[in-house]
Amino acid sequence: MILFFALCFIGVAIAGASAFVIFWPLTLVHVRDRHAGTAADFGAGAFLNPAALRWLLAGGYRSAGDRSLSGLATPARIALLTIIASLAMAGLLWLAAETLA
């Protein structure tokens, strides 16, 4: 039963990844078009750039004061947090299943 719940968390991570793949590129395009200074910090290929992901997780987009940017980056941030949290929970449940078996 524990492994079933771990598998459910994997499904939640996949759903989070789907949302992330939708909203994060839109956020990066918006940053590139309207916030050149921030886009220069990320450089080329910012999709999986650790600095760009750190900026997203820390909520750095809020300091720009752009409501459109917040509207795109907030769902991307929630999706990334969902991916991280659900994979962590799946790992913990797998570890619990291994130790209890």
Image (cartoon, rainbow, N blue to C red):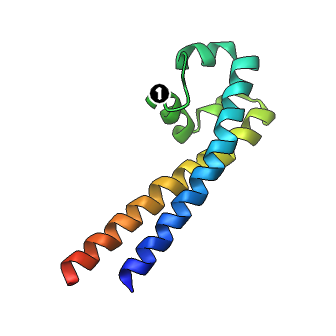
Toward the right, the furthest residue is: 68
Work out whether residue 94 can be spotted. Answer: yes
Vertical order, 34 against 97 (above or below): above
Question: Quadrant of the rendered structure where residue 69 is?
Answer: top right
Residue 21 horizontal/vertical position (percent): 63, 43
Q: Nearer the viewer, residue 62 or 18?
A: 18
The one of 74 and 30 positioned closer to us in this rendering: 30
x, y (%) of residue 17? 57, 51
Task: Write the residue at 61% across / 19% down.
Answer: 38
Q: Name the residue rendered at 66%, 28% in the picture.
A: 28
Q: Residue at x 27, y 76 (%)?
A: 96
Judge whether 87 appears above or below 2 on screen. Answer: above
Disc 1, SS: helix
Find residue 49 and report its horizontal and vertical position in percent: 48, 28
Residue 73 vs 45, above or below: the answer is below
How many numbered badges does the structure rendering display?
A: 1
Picture quadrant where residue 14 is located: bottom right
Amino acid carrying mark 1 in the image: Ala
Q: Quadrant of the C terminus?
A: bottom left
Q: Residue at 64% across / 32% down in the picture?
A: 61
Q: Quadrant of the N terminus?
A: bottom left
Pick the front one: 78 or 1: 1
Residue 62 seen from this side: no
Residue 28 shown left or right of residue 17 in the figure: right
33 w.r.t. 95: above or below = above
Q: Badge 1 is on which residue?
A: 51
Quarter of image, res 88: bottom left
User: Quick one: label 1, few (<14), some, or many (20+) residues within 10 Å?
Assistant: some
